[in-house]
Structures are given as structure tokens and as C-alpha cells.
Image (cartoon, rainbow, N blue to C red):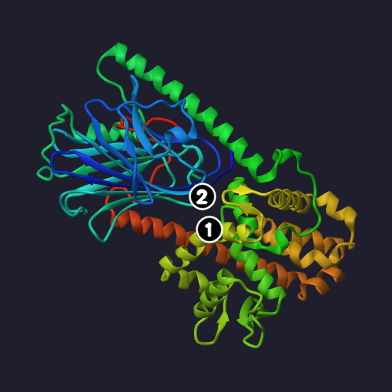
Amino acid sequence: MHLLALFISVFLELLQDGTAVVTETWDIDSTEGTEIYLTRNNLGDIDIYDFGVSDFGQPFVLEDSWDIDRSLSEKAGRCGMVTSRNGRELCWGIGSYGNHHFVVTYRMSNAVKSLEDFDALHMQLVSPGISPTPDDVSVTVKAPVRLGEDNSRIWGFGYRGSVNYTSEGYVRFCSEGNSFDGCSVISLIRFDKGIFNSSSIQDRDFASLLEMAQAGDDFGDDTFEAVVALLTSAFIVLVLILCAVMMRRKVVRNTLGCRIKDVGWYRDIPFDGDILQSDMVLEILGKKNTRSSVAGAMILRMIHNGIILVSKDNKGKVELSFNDNASRASLNEAENELYDMMKRASGEDSVLQQKEFGRWSRSHVSEVSDWAGSLSLTGRRNARVASNMEGRRFTAKGQQNARNLIGLRNFLSDYTLLKERGTAEAVLWKEYMVFAALFGIAEKVAKELQEINPQAFEQQMSYDYNTTFQTLYMTRLMADSITNARTAAQAASAARSGHGGISSFGGGGGFSGGGFGGGVR
């Protein structure tokens, strides 16, 4: 299957009687399959009705029954539901291969539950196992009144990302990055009494529902039901683990064209030296350094190109200054933004000392966090422009570059190999250091290169070993500051949203709706 991209946004408007009016937008580009389907299981007293689909504004014909075995042309412009003992599948025909903008609408009665002390929405709105894996997912919930800390609390489960109140008084759940494999979006919103008048009344309080969600368990008082629930939960966990392993293998094979352990050594520079493409691949493969080491790699390259200058203060500590006479034409947008942030952090003297960027970033959390958050998407865009990717899939050229990247990582990580190579590749040492910073092993590689030939090391780096090592330490501190700003931005988001803010990858048990699977088939 060659699926280029999938972006899903869900808008839930909650009516006063607890009904959810759902609008899902699926932007997708596909070359295979005959239909798309949504899974809506665990419905309980929820009924689904008023189902409809349109593509670029053209409405589909709703059928009374749906035959999934029909051809592409037979399903074109049509939609319908399949009922099973577990719930419903909402299906519609792809119609033709290429780009589509599907808008899917339906209603779910009794979505809001009336509890003893509060009302609540606890629903899986995006299911795990969707094929293809979505590039980006967002869910927005609107209530009959503006929502905020004064009348509600919010939690998100099943994904890595955030949940926040918006300026319009809505609640928004957003995935982060491009790693939605095995994830879902489970919303939990607690409402003060008086907002809804739902007929779905449950004999429990919100604390018990929250405890269930945070533990991921859903046991009743009946012993037999508890045993069945335990076995069901264990089976689901096992299935999810197996699916995650299979998806991980699929991601690795799509990226490299082989297993990671089958990649050997590579001694040249991959992706034509593009740091952002390389960082994006490391993120996809789960090999990304936990720090924002991409910033360290960018700074080293700017130093090597004479755009940033290294000197020492009267105490022998490294400080950075900015060469206004140097051309910045070689810098991409992200590098230019980093350069500007560093220069602003340096103050009136335009000399950046060891701790200045850390102090500056703490007062510019959103700006630094937004910069770091944009890098992965920019890397994907660069990969498509360079023909390393088509949509979400790596081309043969891209897979070769990705293998070369892992091969270079293996090469730089191997001390013995570097000793054996001598100075034959000294002309690449500057780029080796750039990528070693990206891999999070810059200090180790610098030490090994210096031990091979101290004179060649100083000649290539333009600075002695002590200065280089201090510079690496300073760039690592700056990378830590960027990581801290990213964390602080998420924490601030959590503070603004009361209980919630940052989503939890686990938990969420006891939800309504959802299921497993969906997407193209």
C-alpha cells in the first residue's frame, strides 16, 4: 500500500442533553484500498445516527446496509454503517485514488455521563491501529458554555501531546511530533453540574471514574465480570504490544529498507549534510538523543563556517561572538532563527557567555519551544524536496541516506575503527563532529580524534583540544536549555488547563466509543 499522508481533525460539539455532534475531517492521499472506516465500539447506551460523508463538499449517498466486499467503483460516493456485537463501523468509499478531503459527520447520544457529583465525557475519539498512521491528529470539544478552570477539568490519555483550553472556551487535544504509531486519543473532561441534562445516569462519582482512567482498569463489583474484564484487558494489552512491535518493524523497514542491526559502517556524510533530515530520521527510528542535540550540531557548523567565533574570557572560559561580516546564505531558516536567538541572548556586548542562553531561554520559553517543535516537520519537508521521501514513505534514495546515517553513527561510535583509520579522513573531521553532536557523542568522538593525531585535530577544528572541548560543553548546556524550555512550555500548558495539560501515553481505561483499527482497507 502506498499511502502518502493522513491528517485527522475531530470536532465534538456537545449539546445540553449530552449528545455529541461529531465532525471528522480526513485529509488523505491514497493509491490503494476501496474504502475508509471508523471503529466505534464500547458504546453502552450510546446510539450513533445522522451519519453522513462528503468529499470536497460533494455529499455521499447513505445506504441502509454496507457491503465491504464491493469494488472501488461500486463504493464511490457512498457511505454506510456495519453493525457488530461490539459496536459500529462507519464506512465510506474512497472513490478514486489521489487527494481527498473527507468530512464525516454523525451524532452520538448519551456521550456525556451524569455522575453523582459531576458530569463527564470519557471517550476514545481517535482509535489506535489506524492505517496509515496519521501524520497529525487534533480533537476539539465544544460545550454549551465556555469551558475553563472555573467549571471543568481536563485530561488526555493514549498519546504524546497536550490538552488545553483554547481562547474560544473549547478543549483541544493535540498529538506531538510524528510518532502516532500505536497511539489513540482518549478524552476525559469533568463538568460542573448544571451544564448538561443527560439521561445517561451512572451510580458512581467522578473520583472512581478518574481512578479507573489513571489506572487503565475497568472492574465492576461482580467477581465474574472482574475476571472477564481482567482477561480482556490482558488480551488487549498483548494485542497492542504485538501491534506496536509490528508497527515498529514496519516503520524501520520503511525508513531503512532493512533491519537496523543489518546496517554496517559508513564513513561519508549522509543527506548531503542536512542536519534536520538526519534528526528527523533518528526521531522516527527512536535513536534521537533526549537532549535537543540538533542545536549543538547547528552551532558547531556555524563555528566551522566562521559565522560564530570562539574566544575565551579572562578566566579562560569559552564565549561565543557573532561574525557580522560572514555570509549567512548557507544557513537554513531554522539555523538563522537559532543564530538570532543566540545573538539576542548575548545582550548588548553581543558576546554569549556560558550561562547567558540558559537565562534568556527561561524568559522566552514559548519562542524556544516553538523553534524546537518545528524542526521535525521542517526535516520532513526538506526530505520531500530532496526526493528522499514521497509523502510519508521514504524513497530508495531516502532509505539509502537513512542507512548511511545509521552507518555513520555506528562508525563514530566505534573507537577501535577510528584508531585504525588514522588521519586518512581528517578532511571530514569537522562534519564528523557536527554529526557526533547530533548523535549525542561529541565529547567522546573529539577525544578519540584528538588521540589519533593532535596536530591534525587542531588544524581541522581551528582550535586546540581544550577550547574545542569547552565549546562542546557550552553547546550541550544550550541544548539542555532548549529541552528545558520545551518541558517548561508543556508544564505551563498544564498549569493553564488545571488538571491535565500534558497527555499521558498510558491509562484512559473505561472509556466509551473507539476500539482498534480503522482507516483504509
The answer to whether residue 128 is seen in the rendering is no
The spot of residue 54 in percent (x, y) is 35, 45
Tell me the amino acid under the disc marked 1: Leu
Q: Nearer the viewer, residue 212 or 259?
A: 259
Q: Quadrant of residue 248?
A: top right
The spot of residue 251 in percent (x, y) is 60, 41
Taking 2 as reference, is 495 above or below it? below
Tell me the amino acid under the disc marked 2: Asn
SS for dot 2? loop
**What residue is disc 2 on?**
178
Residue 173's mark? Answer: none
Asked if the residue at tag 1 contacts the one at tag 2, i.e. Cβ–Cβ closer than 8 Å, the answer is yes
Is disc 2 surrounded by few (<14), some (14 to 19) or many (20+) residues within 10 Å? some
In-image side of 117 versus 80 (left or right): left
User: What quarter of the picture does the N terminus occupy?
Assistant: top right
The spot of residue 438 in percent (x, y) is 65, 59
| Label 2, label 1: how far apart the Cα atoms are | 8 Å
- Give me the residue at 17% from left, 50% from top: 151
**What residue is disc 1 on?**
377
